[in-house]
Image: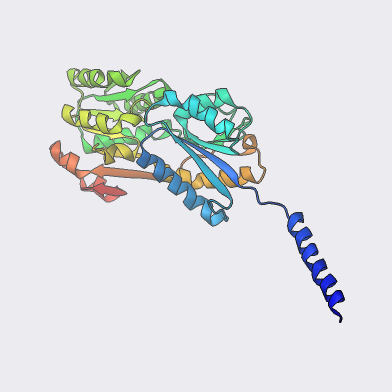
Amino acid sequence: MNRRTLFHMLAGSVLGAHRIAHAQPTRKVYRIGILSLGSEEVRGSSIKALLQGLSPLGYVEGRDFVIESRGAGGRPDRFPDFVAQLIRLQVDVILAPGPALPALKQATSTIPVIMTATLDPVRQGFVQSLARPGTNFTGFSLQSADTAGKRLELLKELVPGPAPVAVLWDQPSIVEWQAAEAAARERGWKLLSLEIRSAGEIEDVLKEAIGARAGTLLVSAAAILFPNARRFAGLVAKSRLPAMYELREYVEAGGLIAYGPDINDIWRRAAVFVDKILKGAKPGNLPVEQPTKFELVINLKTAKALGLTVPQSLIGRADEIIQ
């Protein structure tokens, strides 16, 4: 083989490899938008759980997707601006909690939205039904009304007695109040309805509960209260009212007891929705799911400060005890 023939062969090989490289499709890097209401710590925990769910499905951050995260820091009024930012970034899918969903519904009917925590998406108008959403929304419904009676029972087990239970709720969580009222009526327990409309009313409603001689407090996962979890738990502690919450974050902030869905588990499971949507599924065809993992968390330090002895029956059932 002469040098000229060898040269042409090598040149042809290089050209062929170049053409093959250009013919191969470029891997798309998806943009996943995330909205959060709570603290940086809560947002970080949620993102970590989502990544744990995406990894077994073959997704690698940076190679397959990037995350565009926005945290409202307890201010729901910031969500419209954050939604606008994510739309400008042309994200492929958005994961968001209940308080962010109205802004998303108003801003887009095309970008898929995965609900990570909302009370009743049918009643709130985000989906047509749980089985067939029919909109750009899907994800998870907390269906908190289904567990309101259970929380009331646990609270009564912890603090028995005839004193009324003050139930703190806002308009989005009115179904929880109604469910608690129905459960109390069946058992002959007295309830005190305390509706809250803004964070500025927190101290007033607690004073009302004390004035009405309530023995305990049942707290819904109200959007008004969650961003103020630490401050609220502190004020409840000062009021000396044993309180039952829906989310563990309140107990981690000093609250007494919580029973409700494991939010991090929801974020892990949300990865399946992300995977299906990025592969072409329409959110309107993906049935809304409900939590499958619930957790009972008790703060013994708070119980001691309140002079309460937590029954062994509750301690034995607890998923976590905070000393």
Residue placed at 43% from the left, 23% from the top?
77
- Residue 62 drawn at (x, y percent): 54, 51
The answer to which image quadrant residue 154 occupies is top left
Vertically, is 269 above or below 132? below
Indicate left or right for 292 with 40 as reference: right
Q: Specify the quadrant that holds the N terminus.
A: bottom right
Residue placed at 26% from the left, 43% from the top?
298
Vertically, is 40 above or below 134? below
Vertically, is 275 above or below 89? below
Residue placed at 32% from the left, 49% from the top?
319
Q: Is residue 63 visible?
A: yes
- Given the current orientation, which residue lies at the most extreme bottom position? 1
Indicate left or right for 173 with 313 as reference: right
- Residue 148 drawn at (x, y percent): 37, 32
Q: In the image shown, does 15 or 101 lie closer to the viewer?
A: 15
The answer to which image quadrant residue 110 occupies is top right
- Given the current orientation, which residue lies at the most extreme front position? 3
Q: In the image shown, does 155 or 282 lie closer to the viewer?
A: 282
Residue placed at 37% from the left, 24% from the top?
177
Q: Is residue 292 visible?
A: no
Indicate left or right for 169 with 235 as reference: right
